[in-house]
Image (cartoon, helix red, strand yellow):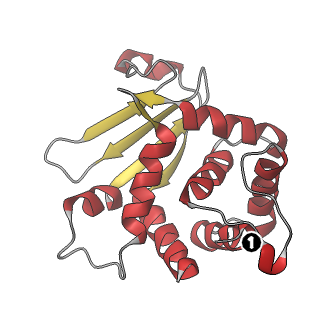
Amino acid sequence: MTLSELVDAISASTGLARGRVYMHARRLQEIGLAPVGQGGRNAPECDIGHVVLTLFALMSGLPVHHAAHAAVEFCELENDGAQALGYVTGMLESVAKVDKLDLTDVPEDLLLAFKSTIAFTSQPEPRMVVRYTCTDTPLEVAFTRDGVPYAPENVEEITESRSIPGTLLFRLGRAIRHVSK
């Protein structure tokens, strides 16, 4: 998919203004985190990792100039050796394979993605938590700078949070699927 298609997919899925999404994606290009090239037939190809990076920039809640760097910080957060970028990219890749939103006979990983919420906070430091609520016992996968989960008593330090519901991941996955055809 091209950068323009990436912007259209994110804008349509999230309801955010296309111009806002474009500014964040363009800033990622300017600092070398998204492919740059000639437009038209020679437009460079973006992948799902670029979609996630742009989504992270938007979720930072920061002005465009700072959001790109915050997105990099979110990408580098870890949990037991797994980086946040790869984890969320895997979630989005799995939902992009679904033709329709029918949860009657879907693999467990897709159901987990649908019933998830990805929460971001940047205060007092960047953290990302993926919460799954479709299991008997709710599950949280926390990503931090040190790769160790935060303690529940640290929750009071969090002053703001933004989240991506699993249903948005499905909408985005379906938009990406249509672009990739």
* Residue 170 visible in image: yes
Provide residue 103's location: percent of width, then percent of height.
Answer: 24, 74
The quarter of the displayed image where residue 37 is located: bottom right
On-image quarter of the N terminus = bottom right
At 46% from the left and 62% from the top, the residue drawn is 169
Provide residue 163's location: percent of width, then percent of height.
Answer: 51, 47
At 35% from the left and 82% from the top, the residue drawn is 100
Query: Which residue sits furthest front?
Result: 42
Q: Is 113 in front, or is 147?
A: 147
Query: Which residue sits furthest left?
Result: 136
Provide residue 6's location: percent of width, then percent of height.
Answer: 66, 68
Counting the numbered discs, the total is 1
**Mark 1: secondary structure:** helix
Q: Is residue 132 above or below residue 45?
A: above
Q: Is 181 in front, or is 108?
A: 181
> Is 63 situated left or right of 83 in this image?
right
Q: Amino acid at mark 1?
A: Ser
Provide residue 126's location: percent of width, then percent of height.
Answer: 58, 28
Q: Is 104 in front, or is 53?
A: 53
At 68% from the left and 46% from the top, the residue drawn is 57
Q: Is residue 65 above or below residue 27?
A: above
Look at mark 1 in the image and give the residue it sits on.
4
Q: Is 81 in front, or is 131?
A: 81
